[in-house]
């Protein structure tokens, strides 16, 4: 018999189960890493832009010449810095803050005579 004749099964390349598992692992890893980066990275970026450092502002001592506010239990004036946040402007009813080129303001709660809100 001629030994040079090979069957169809002998001529097909053998499939490696190990290679398929590695490719599947790499694919799953890339998908999970992309999802984590997308959601965690995106969330961190928006938090810094949307929710700046919140300071506790408990009052405004307003006068035209020298407005002041009580922030983090300290009396501050325009231009002062508290916890790396600059006091930009003090109005009669709000204070403007700035940190890392991000600006926001906090409204003062006005009390009616008798201590009611």
Image: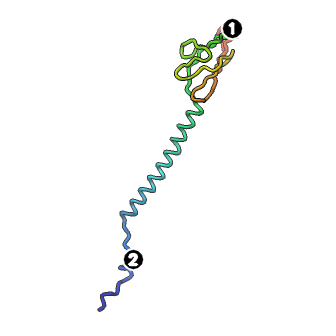
Q: In this view, does 104 lie above or below 22?
A: above
Q: Name the residue under label 2.
A: 12
Q: Name the residue under label 1.
A: 113
Position of 30 with respect to 56 (left or right) is left
Q: What element carries label 2?
A: loop
Quarter the N terminus occupies: bottom left
Residue at screen point 53% across, 43% down: 39
Residue at screen point 66% across, 7% down: 114
Q: In this view, does 41 lie above or below 71?
A: below
Whole-percent x, y for residue 101 in the image:
60, 29
Quarter of the image where one finds residue 93 = top right
Q: Could you tell me how far apart the alpha carbons at marks 1 and 2 are, in whole angstroms? A: 92 Å
- Foreground: disc 1 or disc 2: 2
Crowding near pointer 1: few (<14 within 10 Å), some, many (20+)? few
Colour convention of the picture: rainbow
Residue at screen point 62% across, 12% down: 68
The first of marks 1 and 2 along the sequence is 2
Quarter of the image where one finds residue 42 = top right
**Foreground of the two, 72 or 99:** 99
**Foreground of the two, 58 or 70:** 70
Residue at screen point 50% across, 45% down: 37
Q: Is mark 1 on a helix, strand or loop?
A: loop
Q: Furthest-bottom residue in view?
A: 1
Whole-percent x, y for residue 5 in the image:
34, 87
Quarter of the image where one finds residue 112 = top right
Q: Disc count in the image?
A: 2
Quarter the C terminus occupies: top right
Q: Is residue 35 above or below residue 104?
A: below
């Amino acid at each position: 018999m001629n030994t040079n004749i090979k069957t169809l099964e002998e001529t097909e390349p053998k499939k490696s189960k190990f290679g398929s598992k590695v490719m599947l692992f790499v694919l799953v890893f890339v998908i999970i890493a992309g999802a984590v980066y997308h959601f965690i990275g995106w969330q961190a970026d928006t938090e810094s832009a949307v929710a700046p450092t919140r300071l506790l502002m408990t009052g405004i001592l307003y006068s035209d010449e020298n407005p002041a506010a009580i922030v983090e239990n300290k009396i501050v004036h325009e231009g002062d810095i508290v916890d790396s946040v600059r006091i930009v402007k003090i109005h009669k009813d709000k204070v403007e803050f700035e940190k890392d080129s991000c600006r926001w303001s906090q409204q003062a709660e006005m009390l009616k005579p008798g201590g009611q809100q």
